[in-house]
Amino acid sequence: MRTRRWHPAGLLLLAAALAVVPPHSVAAPDAGGREAVRIGVLAKRGAEQCLAKWGPTADYLDAAIPACDFTIVPLGFDEIQRAVDRGEVEFILANSSFYVDLEVRHGARRIATLENLHIDGTSHTVFAGVLFCRADRDDIRTIGDLKGRRFMAVDRGSLGGWHMQWREMKQAGLDPGRDLADLEFGGSHDAVVYAVRDGLADAGAVRSDTIERMALEGKIDAEAFRIINEHHDDPEEVHFRHSTPHYPEWPLARAAHTSDRLAKQVATALLSMPADDPAAVAARCTGWSPPQNYQAVRECLKELRFPPYEDYGRVSFAAAVRKIGLWLGGLLLAAAVSGHFVVRNARLRTNLRRSEEVAAERAQAWDFVQNVLDSLPVGVVLIDAETRRVRDVNPAAAQMIGRPAEAVTGRVCHDFICPNRTGACPVLDDHQDIDHSERVLLQADGGERPVLKTAVPMKVAGRAYLLETFLDISDRKRAEAERERLAIAMDQAGEMIVITDPAGLIKYVNPAFERITGYTRAEVTGRSTSLLRSGRHDESFYRELWETIGRGETWTGTFVNRRRDGTLFTEAATISPVRDADGRIVSYVAVKRDITDRIALEEQYRQAQKMETVGRLAGGLAHDYNNMMGVILGYTEMMLDGDELTPDVRGEVAEIQAAARRSADLTRQLLGFARRQTIKPQILDLNRTVANLLKMVQRLIGEDIELAWEPQEGLWPVMMDPTQIDQVLVNLCVNARDAIGHDGRITIRTANVADDDGAAPANADGPTGDTVVLTVSDDGCGMTPEVLAQVFEPFFTTKPRGEGTGLGLATVYGIVCQNGGDIGIDTAPERGTEFRIRLPRHAVAPVETEETAPGGRDGAGRETILLVEDEPSFLRAVTLMLTRAGYTVLSAGDAGAALDLARERGGDCDLLLTDVVMPGTSGPELAAQIRALLPNLPCLFMSGYADDEAGGLADPDSPHAFIPKPFNRLELAAAVRRTLDRHGARAAAPDPVGV
């Protein structure tokens, strides 16, 4: 038997057991064929103008959604409510006030907001109201100054032309109907501005942008007006001067019966509408944006008690039902039930003839109500409004507080409920009709339990009470905290994170996405991920992706997408489905990483490997080729030195020798382009070197391009390897050819620039003093500043993938700097390009003659030379050249034979002359082994292939002597003589000997 009984007012909570669930609307199935879709439009200027303005939008949607047939339905002010109520339209396009009314009364929901096109070409989605007067009216500066003035607004139903301003007046304590001397309506925004300008009204109300528009149209001077009560919002929000809170432009809303599928299709199509589409031009807009927040409109209509808020703020039985919702409805129903029982009880007391069975039935009913209250999962507390003490609690409330009901009843409510808000009760102290807020309950252990509290005032038998219900939201708060931590992690992640709905419309992007793509979160939210498409993937690629994630599987792969600025980037992506509790896919989450730089580095590495392979191949071929050229050059030179040849044969041999020399030069160029050439700086006449290259350059650039050569006479000499000049000139001319395309001109110039000419160096490390300038210019497309900043970087190229190495200009830069020069560029888009290379002038030294060369005319001698060469024909040719020069030659075809000779006749050897690259043991390795036997034996290395090992020996700073193949007799003899003399050979140089 229960000992605790609820106060009669507590029985109102029986509503919890009597609440019913409202029926859900069901979308009608699509009709066969093309689905007819009607868009109702508020035709404020008549049906004809409405169709002219919005008909192209229906055409646009027809093309975007072929399965549907869209029709514009012009609706008058008195027709739109009825059309929506009867389901005669699927979508509604109306002003913001109408939309809020349709939203509240008929369940309309906005799917997009119009982007208005201003006369100045800017796009706007929000507007505000403007209060204004003439600038010379010093007596009107605030809203209060409008009292007793003549005032003109646009229309009684105009939101931006009257309602927003009316609300500001009301909040400032001014009643337009009572305090204004006269209130008129001009019928249009322009009419109001003219009336104020001409003194027909003291002040007026128009929509923001009106004054600016009329000024741009030349109708008024904007400086002739003053804005009253001017607001200073973020100019990104409202672009025009205004006096009220801002509100959004017209929304397109879906009717309650319109399917989600159709609404999403229409929204996607409208959000993708280009600003230059005929539909946008006809509507005088720049397209559509995601739906804006219309709370400012709701607040204005509520405060003015305009439809649908005519009864807003009035406290009535019906209002209380709406505010409490199902709970209060149930409570009132419970009150009716209990009242019924009270009446019945009274009747029973006055009617003693009623049976005892009826009394027992009444007792059972009371017990039933008590059981319902005690079994509710929602906490319920009844508080005496005067004493603030708890009158009753149900078990759920006691459990949430963490104390037994007896320990709570009779205590001041703030001991347990909202402990930090003593004296600040929204209902009892602030006189609100209802308090629906998140609060905390203080538990016995000092902890706090978060709850969602609803509190309403009520009176029973003339006494005031506060009825409070609590819903434990601890789990929700924990989930929110977890979501917040997850959101922070997502916001701080270096990878892009994108969450979409099942249709691919973006719901969330993190800052990494904004940073990499250039789009802001606001720009992409509600839009399809297809806005990033680059066109690099075909439809089958995307179809396979959607089929994979549509099956609930994870898709992994790479995209080439397009940033907001139009540049492309590559991303590695993993896209996974997200399911709800029922297993349905409700969204997709994509984690993506920008791998553009990584791919570029990989491509650079592959390109470098390819160039390395080409270089090794070229170098290997050049090695064997140089050996053969050395044989030909050696024998032809020795033949021409003799007297046995007839004049005809001598001429033929000379032709063979010239051809061999040209072949050797070609080999040197091949090695140069493969970057495996040993440089041999020489004193050069740059004019002669360039002139010899012109035929080859013309063949490279083609006959369509004119090649002009403008040398300066008396050009100073420079010290440089001629093959490097070849590389520089060919790379610059090929680069110019690519910039020209067809039918252009390349000009090559040389010039002397004296130290006192005042020319500024291209960089701080450039040459000082007199310089020789080589200029290559073209009339091609030129370069942008962005390209110019990277033009000398290795692997940078503006050509399509696979068509350029990005090494040409980097090679030019390296060669110029290696030779103490600098390079400057003068260029601009569509103005051509000029490369200006400055090389230091070489102080000409006396040229050594054969008579003054060490060792006589041909470097002859009588020493003994240990010669090692694995190519037999070249071995014989070198042996013969050295023998004719007077040397004794011990020849060996490999390292083993050379070691044997060193052991047997090492005491006779004065010099080791060995090839660098040989099978088995290399030349440097052989030299080390022989020097172990003969520590003081000097070495002269020779090679036709400057690999890493030979290149080091060829370095001018190397302590080892080196001669590159092919060489002639005099070059060989001079190199041998220098090496012997440098190391102090045992035998003195002999008198010159003829060969």
Image (tube, grey):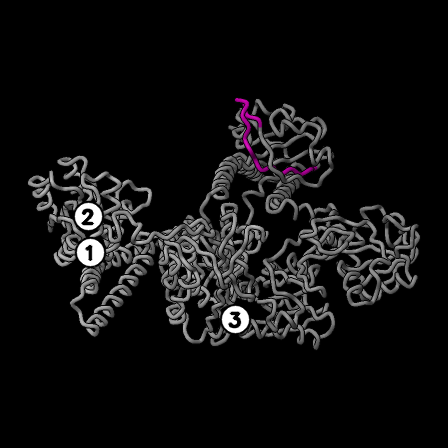
* Magenta span includes 911: no
User: Where does residue 291 sit, x and y in percent of width and height?
Assistant: 60, 57
Could you tell whether 469 is left or right of 649 in the image?
right
Q: Which residues are magenta?
A: 442-458
What secondary structure is the stretch in magenta mostly built from?
strand
Q: Earlier in the sequence, mark 1 or mark 2?
A: 2
Amino acid, disc 3: Ala
Compare residues 908 and 95 and report the one nearer the observer: 908
Compare residues 102 and 870 and report the one nearer the observer: 870
When asked about the image quadrant of residue 80, the answer is bottom right
Amino acid, disc 1: Gly
Front position among marks 3 and 1: 1
Mark 3 = which residue? 64
Front position among marks 2 and 3: 2
* Magenta span includes 453: yes
Neighbour tally class for label 1: few under 14, some 14-19, many 20 plus, Cα within 10 Å? few
Mark 2 = which residue? 861
Could you tell whether 139 is left or right of 294 in the image?
right
Count up the numbered dots.
3
Mark 1 = which residue? 994
